[in-house]
Image (cartoon, rainbow, N blue to C red):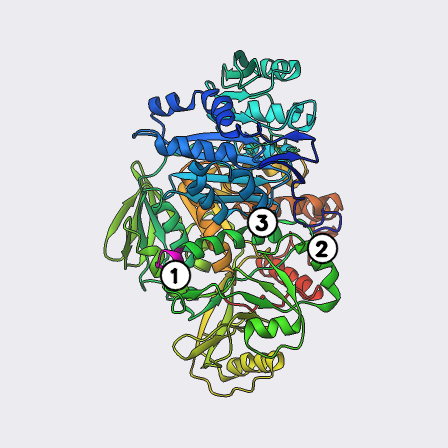
Amino acid sequence: MSHSSPLWQALPRAKIDWNGDTPISKDFDDIYFNPGQGLAESRHVYLLGNDILARWRQSTRERFVIAELGFGSGLNFCATVQAWLAAPEPKPKLHFVSVEGFPMSTADLERALSHWPELSDIKRGLLAQYPDPIPGTHRLRFYDDDITLDLWWGDVIWATAQWAEQDLQVNAWYLDGFAPSKNSSMWSDQVLDNIAHCSPSGCTASTFSVAGKVKTSLLERGFSIHKKPGFGRKREQLFAVKQSDTKPFSINSTPWHKSAAKSTIPKHVAVIGAGLAGSFAAYALAKRGIKVSVIDPNGVATQASGNAQGIIYCRIPKRHAPLGDFGVLAFRYATQLYQDLLTQNVLREGTDASLCGMLHTFQMGTASELELNINQLPNLAQIVSDDEANELSGLSISAPMLYYPRSGWISPKALCKALLSHPHITLVTDTFERLTPSDSGQELRCSSQTLLADCVVVTAGTATKNLIPNTLLPTKAIRGQTTQIPAISAIQAALCHEGYIAPAVDGQHCIGATFDLDDCDTSPRPSSDQENLAKLDTFLSIKESRVLGHRVSFRCTTPDYLPIVGQAPDNKALQERYQALQFDGKRIISQACPMQTGVFMLTGLGSRGLTYGPLAGEFLASLINQEPLPVAGELIKALSPARFAIRQLKRRSSAKSRSDWYEAATAPPSLRRPRSASPARSSKPVCRCFRSAWSSARRRGRTRGMGTWN
Ligand code: SAM
């Protein structure tokens, strides 16, 4: 995070005037839809305008992608869902992608949609998941995942650039960003370039606007233009069809996070590892109808994911940076999934999990900054006084706390079991030994059998780097010990301090966890129990000495604390393709990355498996199934397994730009300077990297909570 990166804050809410129940934007001085006729208008301009119903009838695709500029009240989305529900089978799944820079409040959205009782069920479903204005991408799922809504909360230029970057393939556009005369940003050349980039041949666009600029801009970008009768008193509206696959520009950065070869969509995936990472990956794939074999010699959640309780942890970022941005978006997605699993009784309230809220300590000096960050995000976090904290927790806390009302605790093992009980998933209790690519996919040699799968996802924690040769994965195992203590009956919310505690299950709390660097002791130690008990005493003045049990496991951690999610690079070929980056780290090499065909990974969840896992699994499954992706390009890079190799190449370039690396590499041995501790030259780059991340986190006082297990 650099001090020049923008502050992390909620997006501004839409400012609304009302004409009856019709919203009018104060910011843009324009109507969201025609008073009293919004639904009919939406059907006419966008559904009929794009000939959506006929195209669903004729479609042989698995999915139909609609992209919208301006989510507003969600009326276009609701009208489309209503039409989809009424459309006869067979029909493609609906993937609706929409950008909004000024999200309406829940109350305004509810009011704007209240005019149409026929939409009330759809509206209720939308409101149940409608996200706070947290900047970034929010994936919402409806009707057993037949309908997906990706809300890109942010500016239209940013969002459409992200869509272009991920090569989103759109079938129909709803261009609904107010009139060009009132809001030129929605119709800027950059936005229209991005639209054209995401429009394959046959893609359509419709808009109420017939402004000359809109027509010429679309014509210039390879669309043919047709006029159709407009809605109500409007004589005409515009309908455009993209005539070819041409893209107006090439992306101006090295696509090292993308695969150079297009793979096929798998029917059967093998997932190695049945912990949280494997369970989330398997579940997200199985929900897409893909058959999944999960291979683990020890059964479900026996390693780091086997603790009795974990907290759904979140940290409010100060400024935009991948770790904080991903953390908050993943937290929202995770808590939504857990709420759904509890509602469906897949998880049992109080036994397997409880979203009872979580209280977190914070540094008092940062309160005003924090207030600014979480302003307008009451469902994410609120600062509560010590009295309120006491009421929420049932304990005696002597300081204001940060309260996350949608968080809570989960039994990771129960969660893994619940996710792996999906009918498309089979658990194979066997030891995976070797992977051999074959003509028909991946051959997985296990101790007592050989399995064939179309592709493989390795989720084996720190063992992942040994199971996928030819990758550079600087992961590290960090010891953590949890301690079981008798129930303190008063606790009603999860609490995170230097350690954590949650409401008791079966008369016991699981408290923890230690954070023991460079420690590979697998046996529980009394000193680790004492450490956990001492932290509890310091924070809550609870003097407990009875230890009912304990457990040691090892977190798989990365130097940047972000998980590793994506396709495995072919490291040797990557080094060759991108070798120029070691001389000039800023150089743009237009070729995508050579990847290992059909080999993916999800690991490095560290202490945040419960928070990061759901979105990481969803992203990976979307990537494998070649769907629109639920995260922005900069986060895809930040999660990419190739990032470590690329950073290593670039580090050489920055060392060289200080004439350091170059001199050392080229001077005759007698003239070489003694080796310094530059990471590029370190014989142990992994540990050094990790150590420097840890020590800089320590300097910034950010290691608190790193010892939280989840
Ligand atoms: N489709 C909406 C519906 O069904 O209610 C109506 C959309 S309204 C006509 C236009 C929307 O574009 C507004 O919600 C506005 O906040 C949004 N908007 C305007 N400028 C924007 C920008 N630069 N980036 C993102 N969204 C923007």
Rendering quadrant holding ligand 1: top right
Q: Taking 157 as reference, is 396 above or below it?
A: below
Q: Quick check: can you spot residue 174? A: yes
Check disc 1 and report its element: helix, strand or loop: helix
Q: What x and y, as percent, mark residue 361?
A: 63, 69
Residue 25 within the magenta-colored segment of the rendering = no
Amino acid carrying label 3: it is Asp
Of the two numbered discs 3 and 1 in the rendering, the one whose residue sits closer to the viewer: 3
Q: Give the residue at mark 2.
A: 372
- Is the CB of the residue bearing disc 3 within 8 angstroms of ligand 1? no
Q: How many angstroms separate mark 3 from mark 1 (CA)?
A: 26 Å
Query: Is 572 located above or below residue 170 in the figure?
Result: below
Quickly name the residue at label 1: 415
Q: Crowding at label 1, few (<14), some or many (≥20) Cα neighbours within 10 Å?
A: many
Q: Is residue 515 visible?
A: no
Instruction: Count residues near mark 3 (Cα–Cα under 10 Å), then give few for <14, some for 14-19, many for 20+.
Output: many
Q: Is residue 342 magenta?
A: yes
- Give whichever of 247, 319 is nearer the camera: 319
Q: Residues within 10 Å of mark 2 (few under 14, many from 20)?
A: some
Label 3 SS? loop
Q: Position of residue 202 (x, y in %)?
A: 45, 18
Residue mark closest to the camera, 2 vs 1: 2
At a point 50% along the width and 42% down the height, the residue shown is 630
Q: Nearer the viewer, residue 666 or 662?
A: 662
Which residues are the magenta region?
341-347
Mark 3 or 1 closer to N-term?
3
Query: Residue 312's x, y, as percent?
Result: 51, 62
Which residue corresponds to mark 3?
132
Q: Which x, y percent locates residue 564? A: 51, 51
Work out whether mark 2 precedes mark 3 in sequence or the reverse, and give the earlier one: 3
Q: Residue at x 56, y 80 (%)?
A: 531
